[in-house]
Image (tube, grey):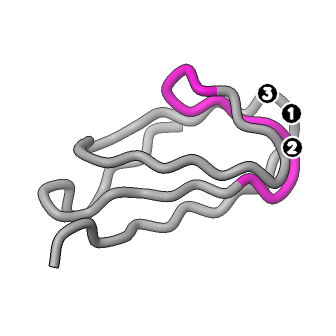
Amino acid sequence: MNFQLKNPNINGVYIFVIEGEIVVDEQYIKQRDGYGLWEISDFNIIAKTDAEFLIIEVPMKA
């Protein structure tokens, strides 16, 4: 799955894995772990198991 930020010039993204295991741009993330990305326009998510995760796009600049 590919996710594109709505406003990559200003926003970053925080990913929280509720259940399961995923890989985000080669970073392995397990249940109840979080991961932040910034200065990107898109990223890939690969589910290693059945997974539920939350993606929050957040402003990085005022």
| Magenta part of the chain | 17-27
Q: Which residue has dot 1 on it? A: 49
Question: Mark 1 near mark 3, Cβ–Cβ under 8 Å?
Answer: yes
Q: Which residue has dot 2 on it? A: 20
Taking the spot 67% from the left edge, 57% from the top edge, the residue there is 16
Q: CA distance from mark 2 to mark 3?
A: 8 Å
Question: Mark 1 near mark 2, Cβ–Cβ under 8 Å?
Answer: yes
Relative to residue 9, is residue 38 drawn left or right?
A: right
- SS class, disc 1: loop
Q: Amino acid at mark 3?
A: Lys
- Crowdedness of circle 1 by 10 Å Cα count: few (<14), some, many (20+)? few
Taking the spot 86% from the left edge, 43% from the top edge, the residue there is 20
Taking the spot 73% from the left edge, 33% from the top edge, the residue there is 47
Q: Residue furthest top?
A: 26
Q: Amino acid at mark 1?
A: Thr
Q: Quadrant of the C terminus?
A: bottom left
